[in-house]
């Protein structure tokens, strides 16, 4: 075999190997004998619902400075169930239910985001009050009252707002809650997320 024929044979062999490799790597996983990968979860946790604070509406974005100095931005919580509690140090039902929100955070970790917002009606040092407790959830003070208004809040406390992972309100009411009620609200908001993912 002359040099030209050997060169042509080598190129043909290389081309056949390349085509075989491409065919193998483009096969479905099941055809390769491996386990098929689960479908990727939807990454776009945005809703086209109208803006508002009523159930079925998408809560407008906001940012508050937390009591630890960090920032809480609502849109950064997409993909999680978000629970917002309006409270005040002088509101006995408010302080009595704070442990329930902390228990929910501990139960669901990174799947839930909890923010307790103290109203602008401040009579006590909020940070000094919280120093007496070992809460891991986020706290902030709405010094202007703008976010409380955004939530449809008033001087009536406590108030709880729950959002699904798409930022849509699933619950917004004034009144005390129990841990069991919070757990049900969390599961309902999460179920709404699953239903939306199934329809995508």
Image (tube, rainbow, N blue to C red):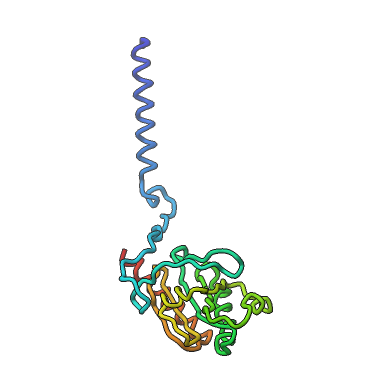
Of the 4 image quadrants, the one containing the C terminus is: bottom left
Q: Seen from this angle, which residue lies furthest right?
A: 132
Of the 4 image quadrants, the one containing the N terminus is: top left
Residue drawn at point x = 47 percent, y = 83 percent: 159
2 versus 100 height, above or below: above
Residue drawn at point x = 55 percent, y = 89 percent: 93
| Whole-percent x, y for residue 110 in the image | 53, 67
In this orientation, does residue 10 appear? yes
In this orientation, does residue 193 appear? no
Query: Could you say which quadrant of the image residue 198 lies in?
Result: bottom left
What is the count of numbered marks? 0
Q: Seen from this angle, which residue lies furthest top?
A: 2
Query: Could you say which quadrant of the image residue 39 lies in?
Result: bottom left
Residue drawn at point x = 59 percent, y = 70 percent: 67
| Whole-percent x, y for residue 83 in the image | 48, 75
Nearer to us in this view, 122 or 79? 122
Nearer to us in this view, 142 or 71? 142
157 versus 46 height, above or below: below
| Whole-percent x, y for residue 20 in the image | 36, 35
Nearer to us in this view, 100 or 18? 100
On the rendered structure, is 20 left or right of 159? left
| Whole-percent x, y for residue 2 in the image | 36, 10
């Amino acid at each position: 075999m002359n040099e030209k024929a050997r060169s042509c044979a080598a190129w043909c062999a290389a081309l056949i190997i390349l085509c075989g490799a491409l065919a193998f790597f483009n096969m479905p996983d099941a055809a390769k004998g491996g386990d098929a990968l689960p479908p990727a979860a939807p990454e776009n946790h945005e809703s086209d619902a109208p803006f508002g604070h009523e159930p079925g509406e998408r809560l407008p974005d906001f940012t508050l400075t937390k009591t630890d100095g960090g920032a809480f931005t609502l849109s950064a919580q997409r993909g999680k169930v978000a629970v917002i509690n309006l409270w005040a140090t002088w509101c006995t039902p408010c302080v009595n239910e704070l442990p329930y929100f902390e228990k929910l955070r501990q139960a669901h970790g990174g799947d839930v985001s909890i923010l307790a917002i103290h109203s602008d009606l401040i009579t006590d040092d909020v940070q000094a009050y919280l120093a007496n407790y070992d809460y891991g959830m986020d706290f902030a003070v709405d010094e202007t009252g703008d976010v409380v208004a955004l939530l449809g809040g008033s001087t009536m406390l406590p108030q709880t707002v729950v959002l699904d992972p798409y930022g849509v309100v699933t619950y917004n009411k004034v009144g005390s809650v129990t841990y069991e009620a919070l757990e049900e609200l969390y599961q309902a908001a999460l179920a709404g997320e699953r239903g939306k993912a199934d329809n995508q």
